[in-house]
Image (spheres, rainbow, N blue to C red):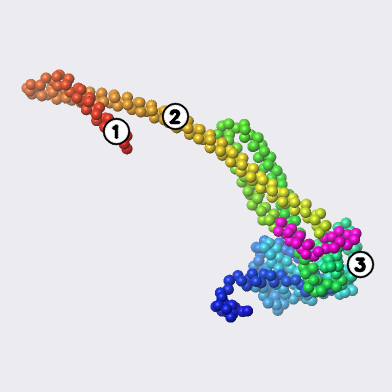
Amino acid sequence: MSQSESGTVSGTQFQEHPLRATVLGEVHARPFYLTEAPRGFLHLAFMTNGKSNGDERAWLNALCEARGAPAVSPTARFHQVPFGRGILRWEGHSEFSTYTWDSPIAPESEFFGGDMADTPFGEAFRAPGPLIAAIRLELRAQPVVPETVYALFDPISLCVSRTETGTARIVTDFKQDGDGRTRVLVLDNGMGQQAAGALVMRLLEIETYRTLALLGLPQAHECGPEILEIEETLTAISAQLPETKNISANRDLLHQLSRLATSVEAIAAASAFRFGATRAYDEIVALRLRAIDEEMEPGYSTWATFLARRLAPAMRTCQATERRLETLSMRLSRAASLLRTRVDVELEEQNRVLLESMNKRARLQLRLQQTVEGLSVAAISYYVVGLIGYSAKGLKSLGLPVEDKLVVALAVPVVIAGIWWIVRRIRRRHGDV
């Protein structure tokens, strides 16, 4: 079924979702290799953190052009290009990239000898970031493990197990050889090409992802002392809570708790991605181990048993550190909430005392105002009566029959009553406002 220029599927009237091709192609993004013994694999994983994606694709495109291969699609996360006698496969991930080169090897060549020459990882190779995992895997057509092979591995950590219903044996010691690579040997005793390719890919992924999963352990160790210091400080502050009585001391403790909470959030933010990635990688390792379905080889440890003894404690350390951060954050939140409540209660008490003091002051001011109003009525009345007296004396000096003292005496009660009424009216208007 093809897609027309209008964006509809040929033969239908339906409009395709813009991501339909992406999600349909995801199941084919990382196909299993079709391979058969004898063949060697060099697998390298580099940390990129998504920052060197453009430069990495540019180098890959230059390599493809030099080899006459198609260029890498801007959205592709998997690409392969012929190189020498083999094929170089590139895979892009969120924080790392892998390069896997496989090539045929001579059946009579010694195990992990110098048969894999002219690899793409020479001086012209441009690493996209720091190397995190390096694996050399050999797929050999052998029914049993030759005794000479055991000398190539460390007997203390040697793991040998059967898989693919007994048609394959896998051998490794999870240690680096002189070239800094982990050696993995797969002995084929009748696997098909697809089964062999799937097994090789899963073994490479187990070693890659178990290395990436362990990146969380140094982060946990780095966080440990700082978390312990914060826990001890919080314990000391919690012991002081019953003893603090005044608002100033409670505010000081609240500020200390805020600083501790800020430190915890900073640690959690810095380690959240690493711990989350560690969980995801650990789950992938567990899935791949279940997929290969190991059977124990008498006298040797299986891959799953060996990794469970070494990897599980590291994962528990990372998980415990995450839980400590979560618990510490909740404890700080509860302590801060308690202190805020205490500070709020103390502030409300202070506000109540302040309001009572303001009410008392207002009552005193009212009494003073009433006293001033009484005095002001008397004073104004005195001046008004004085003016009336001067007026009466002036009329008397003009020869009018006016008794100035009698006029003043009669005016006193009238003036007092009038001034009192005016002041009261003014006060009532102010009260309405």
- Report which residue position mark 2 lands on: 357
Mark 2 and mark 3 residues within 8 Å of each other at the beta carbon:
no
Q: Earlier in the sequence, mark 2 or mark 3?
A: 3
What's the magenta region? 278-303
* Residue 99 horizontal side relative to residue 392, left or right: right
* Residue 99 horizontal side relative to residue 10, left or right: right
- Kindly report the distance in space between the C-alpha atoms of the residues bearing marks 1 and 2: 26 Å
Badge 1 crowding class, 10 Å Cα cut-off, few under 14, some 14 to 19, many 20 or more, is: few
Badge 3 crowding class, 10 Å Cα cut-off, few under 14, some 14 to 19, many 20 or more, is: few
Say which of marks 1 and 2 sits in front.
1
The amino acid sitting under disc 1 is: Arg
Establish if 421 lies above or below 280: above
Check residue 146 in the rendering and tell me which mark sits there, or answer none: 3
Q: Please identify the quarter of the rendering in which residue 129 is found.
A: bottom right
Query: Number of marks in the image?
Result: 3
- Report which residue position mark 1 lands on: 428
| SS category of the residue bearing label 3 | loop
- Residue occupying the point 68% across, 56% down: 276
| SS category of the residue bearing label 1 | helix
Establish if 335 lies above or below 311: above
- Residue occupying the point 88% across, 71% down: 142
Establish if 128 lies above or below 340: below
Measured from the top left, where is residue 239 in percent x and y?
Answer: 65, 35
- Kindly report the distance in space between the C-alpha atoms of the residues bearing marks 1 and 3: 115 Å
Q: Earlier in the sequence, mark 1 or mark 2?
A: 2
Residue at the farthest bottom position: 11
Where does the C terminus fall, quadrant-wise?
Answer: top left
Measured from the top left, where is residue 427 in percent x and y?
Answer: 29, 32
